[in-house]
Image (spheres, rainbow, N blue to C red):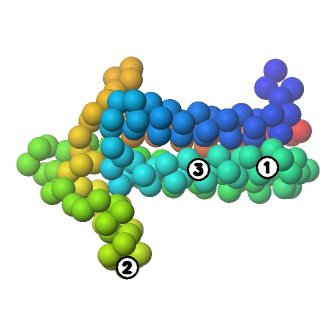
Amino acid sequence: MLQSLSPRLVFFGLALMALIALVFARFYLQEALGLPPCPLCMTQRVFVVLWGSIALLAALHNPAAVGRRIYAGLCALAAVAGAAVAIRHVWIQHLPPDQVPACGPSLEYMLETLPFSETLELVFMGDGNCADIQWTFLGLSIPEQTLVMAAAVLLVCMWQVFRKQ
């Protein structure tokens, strides 16, 4: 049954999943519920945009087997990077309160005033804002949900790499 799905349709599905996740985060979590994204949340969004964009390009291009594998590999790398950031975020959320890093400046402020390399370092370290669990669904925090989604994207991409069609 899965083999009957065209690679193009699978890539469109991955792109649609990314779009839905981004719309949900921006318009429901951020606008409707008023939950401001922390630096790690913003970084995870970047990787969702990246794998969604790669998947959309792959769907539009509809390459042969070698191209499909390259697109799927690139999409998988973006999913792994997003998962790594989500894992760091989940780890910060589960630290004992006395070990949570202090709150830092906003991402916008860091990008405006600090060198890019220092901003990246501070973002990946996370801060106290990243430790707050403000919303859950089925018992999973937002970065835990992102981690599950990244794992699903990775599995689909690996299937795209190794499938026969």
Quarter of the image where one finds residue 78: bottom right
Task: Say whether residue 146 is left or right of residue 102.
Answer: right
Q: Position of residue 99 (x, y in %)?
A: 13, 51
Label 2 to label 1: alpha-carbon separation: 34 Å
Task: Say whether residue 102 is left or right of residue 130.
Answer: left
Task: Check disc 1 and report its element: helix, strand or loop.
Answer: helix
Q: Residue at x 32, y 68 (%)?
A: 110
The numbered disc on residue 75 is none
Label 1 to label 3: alpha-carbon separation: 14 Å
Q: Nearer the viewer, residue 162 or 23?
A: 23
Quarter of the image that includes the N terminus:
top right
Q: Nearer the viewer, residue 82 or 114?
A: 114
Task: Check disc 2 and report its element: helix, strand or loop.
Answer: loop
Residue at mark 2: 115
Q: Residue at x 74, y 46 (%)?
A: 56
Task: Say whether residue 20 is left or right of residue 143.
Answer: right
Q: From the image, state whether disc 1 or disc 3 is nearer to you.
A: 3
Q: Nearer the viewer, residue 96 or 17?
A: 17
| Residue 43 makes an appearance in the image | yes
**Nearer-N-terminus badge (1/3):** 3
Q: Position of residue 77 (x, y in %)?
A: 60, 55
The numbered disc on residue 49 is 3
Task: Say whether residue 37 is left or right of residue 26.
Answer: left
**Nearer-N-terminus badge (2/1):** 1
Label 3 to label 2: alpha-carbon separation: 23 Å
Q: Amino acid at mark 3?
A: Val
